[in-house]
Amino acid sequence: SQKIEQNSEALNIQEGKTATLTCNYTNYSPAYLQWYRQDPGRGPVFLLLIRENEKEKRKERLKVTFDTTLKQSLFHITASQPADSATYLCALSSGSARQLTFGSGTQLTVLP
Amino acid sequence: GAVVSQHPSRVICKSGTSVKIECRSLDFQATTMFWYRQFPKQSLMLMATSNEGSKATYEQGVEKDKFLINHASLTLSTLTVTSAHPEDSSFYICSASSDSFDYGYTFGSGTRLTVV
């Protein structure tokens, strides 16, 4: 069955450092991989989308890589700030199906 | 940017009653809307996919008679939890997409349902 794993249920880093979150998947050939941020009691907020034929995507302090051979995506936040503290979710979808399948999330805490 | 409004944000109801949750796309036409359920410390689990003007497609294990979904227009989808029980207490979230998938999905702010 399809499985999405986000390594590290929780990650604590010092302000100013780069946070790296991992998303691994099995039994899946996603056409798109997305990253969302979720704050407590709120819905997810879209951050970045990367396609299967793209290796890397950047947006301001955020960078996503997508390795379809390793079946892995890495999500980086550079120059992290306490305001970046949240749960980060990766989500996959195939080309035909518009549904998203979410990973369990990584709770990031940036310490001042 | 795209905005999805979800109401109510919190609701407490008695066991056996029904609750309706609304999801509206405010500045775009949502051809497809999705309903998710999230338990504490867990990820979002897709319950159903609704397309405007047609019946919703439910995920395996989701009771369609219990979770009624109506997508009557391109801007409104509703989820009705019928005959609610304490085990239905959860965080329900909708999301909407237009035909363009390139910019991710827009999610509502969620509804915390507590059945007492």
Image: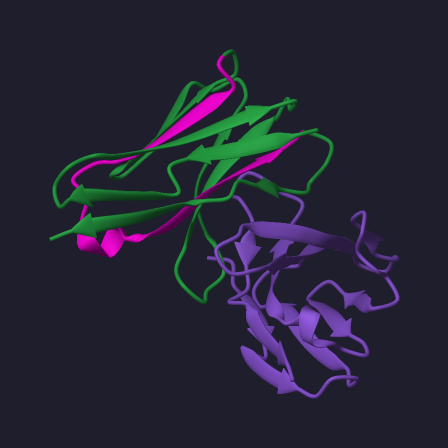
Chain colours: A green, B purple
Q: Position of residue B74 (x, y in %)?
A: 73, 62
Q: Position of residue A48 (x, y in %)?
A: 43, 39
The residue at the far bottom in this view is B14
At x 56%, y 33%, the residue is: A4
Closer to the camera in the image, B107 or B25? B107
| Left or right relative to B90: residue B50 | right
At x 61%, y 26%, the residue is: A31
Does the magenta portion include B25? no
Closer to the camera in the image, A30 or B38? B38
| Left or right relative to A89: residue B65 | right
Closer to the camera in the image, A22 or B110? A22
Q: Position of residue A63 (x, y in %)?
A: 32, 31
Magenta stretch in the rendered image: A70-94
| Left or right relative to A9: residue B59 | right
- Quadrant in the rendering for residue A22: top left
Image: B42 above or below B14:
above
Whether residue B31 appears in this view of the structure is: no
The N terminus of chain A appears in which quarter of the rendering? Answer: top right
Whether residue B3 appears in this view of the structure is: yes
Closer to the camera in the image, A89 or B49? A89
Image: A3 above or below A35:
above
The residue at the far top in this view is A69
Does the magenta portion include A77? yes
- Quadrant in the rendering for residue B80: bottom right
| Left or right relative to B91: residue A22 | left
At x 55%, y 26%, the residue is: A25
